[in-house]
Image: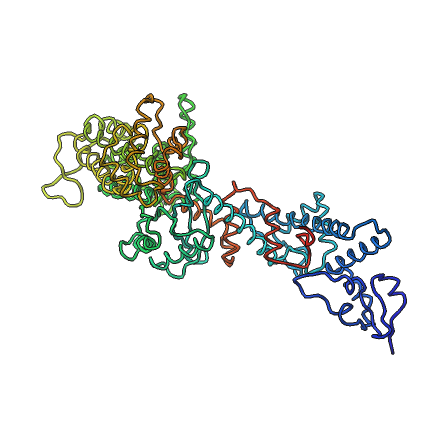
Amino acid sequence: MNRYCQREWLETFEFVSYSTEQDGLYCLPCVLFPTSSTREQPTLLVKRPFRNWKDAKNDLQVHGLLENHRNSEARMKAFKDTMQNPGRRIDLSMTSESINRTKKNRAFLLSVIKCLEVCGRQGFALRGHRDDSTADPLSNKGNFHALLQLRVDAGDVALAEHLETCARNATYISKTSQNQLLECIKQYILETIVKDITSQPFGPHYGIMADEVTDVSNWEQLGLLVRYTKDQKPVERLLMFSECEKITGRALCDTIAADLAGVNLDPANCRAQCFDGAGNMAGVRNGCAANFKEIATRAPYFHCASHDLNLALCKACKVQDIHCMMETLKAVGIFFKYSPKRTRELEKAVENENEERRAAGRTQLLKTKVKPMCETRWVEKHTCLEDFHELHEPLTDCLEAITSEEGWDAKARTEAGGLLSQLKRPAFLCAFECALYIFGYTKSLSTLLQGSTMDIIKAYEQVDLVRKELRSIRERADEEFHQVYLSASEMAQRLGQDMEVPRRCRRQTQRCNVEADTPEVYFRRSIFVPFVDGMVEQLTSRFPQLTAHACRALMLIPSNVHSLQQDHIQQLREYYEPDLPSPLSLQQELRLWKAQWQGVIVTEKPDSLDATISHQYSNPAIFPNVCMMLQLLMLTPVTTAGVERANSALRYIKDVYRSTMGEDRLNALILLFVHRDIPLDYNRIIDIYATGHPRRMMFINPLAE
């Protein structure tokens, strides 16, 4: 059966025209007014005649929906209108049509980006088990598609119209489009951070912090943060995570240098690097810090002060009784953590204790559980000590009940009996009270060192303050320990125990064997004094570089500038000379700086780095060298706590259900999750997407100047 072109097709599709010479159909707008596009133009109906009469109606309908065709049709309509009305300009008409179509396309893409932003900010998984067109309509397609549907139901006309009329290969909500849009969001966030760094008034200098962590896919991820100043305040920002096949010092250094160069940050502008004390990071010869120092010669290495403090506390806790006490508390936490039955018994004991306290008019207990000792965070260990102090009575009652009551298995009764005997030991009680008392001085320091705005001078002052106070306690050990001993005696009295000196012998290697006439003297000599001595020694020996660097600049603070001497000026010159704008006039400038603050009342002199920089007297035009040194001091990272927080955020983004996530998608989502305070410029993101990923739909007006 022969088929021919039918007249009804020409009436239905006004854009087609029949060629008798070619015996085929052409699209008149596409032939006369072709549009420039980076994608391949259709050949049928444009370059070659259409003769597929069997599928003509369907093919013509599909062609009529193409973006290129609609643009050509708009151009042809504008041309016809201009010919009928010569007073109208065709370029203005075409521009107006293009602007309207561009606005329409950008409107629905804006809705897609906002759904991606919500998922990223909240740490939600975007995709379900299947989110493509072949998925079961009743299956869960994920949070992203659910948010799109929610916007449609809430009245998002642009998104609803797009999803109803778009071609199946131009929805812009597929996993590929998701990744491309997330890449554009990541690019915008990184551009914002880099712009803040390069726009600093004293130059594009910065400090870096890095640490590696193993993700759920058993990949080593290296987190990289930068520290810079914005509005005269220090800011720490996560740049990215990078997968590391090797974690040697050289490999990590190369990764850091490549990551910095990838975001257009010159490693030579780095002025400080802060890592933990692992061998591959802090090694003198082959560590990451030593290798990076060859690239960034003005970037000294600083050991993380928070890690230093944790190591100092760990080493100080090597006193035998303190160590045994910590291990006992860890065992108590584990004993209750993995057994719901034991946890319910402890809650019952707490409730009984609260009933007795209500009857006596005493303050009730708010805690109902004991936490296991955290191995790395000493702030959490102090919290654990406080919880145990509060729950000591119901805890011992619970262990006694488990030991004596029927219905408990032999293992639980044996473990409960062993823990109960340990908790009642006088040495345990004294060690516990000593640790609770001494850690009270270091808790605030641990909290401060985990902040992101701590500068090196403030960190040094806080460490020095704690060290001086512990030395004072050591000098007054008799009276200081007396209060600690009274607290331990009260706990022993509530348990029906007496404070006794442990059995001594002539030769003892497993525990302290000092001579003493009373239990108080014995425990002071065996626990309190060695513990305080160890703490002071560790705080003194583990912060030498922090102390040296801070002491160099401490004389710049107005509250200390009266002590500025010639040797201090020489030290500052030797260290900061390569970065100073006018090193030859440094001595004169420092003398003027000192003279300026001599007439100021002591109470009005700034005593911190940030207060000094923001003071009206800190004028870069008058004191360029001083302001530069203060700026560089603000860039010095004190701890890697920011990296640790980013590592904690990593487990919310890449979990067991998203273990195969790609690195680009991971970085985009974690930057959205971590940097919630960076608002997104949606128009800029759409421009990045249209430029980097040109598609069929028009998102930038091609006729705009």
Q: Residue 346, position in %: x, y?
A: 40, 37
Q: Quadrant of residue 575?
A: top left
* Residue 71 visible in image: yes
Q: Residue 141, position in %: x, y?
A: 63, 54
Count of numbered circles on the image: 0
Q: Residue at x 22, y 29 (%)?
A: 472
In the figure, is residue 223 to the left or right of 149?
A: left
Up/down of 136 relative to 335, above or below: below
Residue closest to the eye, 386 or 109: 109
Residue closest to the eye, 688 or 405: 688
Which quadrant is the N terminus positioned in?
A: bottom right
In the figure, is residue 400 to the left or right of 103?
A: left
Extreme residue toward the bottom, this view: 1
Q: Residue 201, position in %: x, y?
A: 44, 40
Q: Residue at x 40, y 32 (%)?
A: 619
In the figure, is residue 544 to the left or right of 409?
A: left
Residue closest to the eye, 516 or 84: 84
* Residue 383 visible in image: no
Q: Residue at x 50, y 44 (%)?
A: 675
Residue closest to the eye, 597 or 534: 597
Q: Colour mode?
A: rainbow
Q: Residue at x 34, y 29 (%)?
A: 607
Q: Residue 535, position in %: x, y?
A: 24, 38
Extreme residue toward the left, this view: 506
Q: Quadrant of residue 442?
A: top left
In the figure, is residue 157 to the left or right of 376?
A: right
Extreme residue toward the front, this view: 584
Up/down of 143 relative to 2, above or below: above
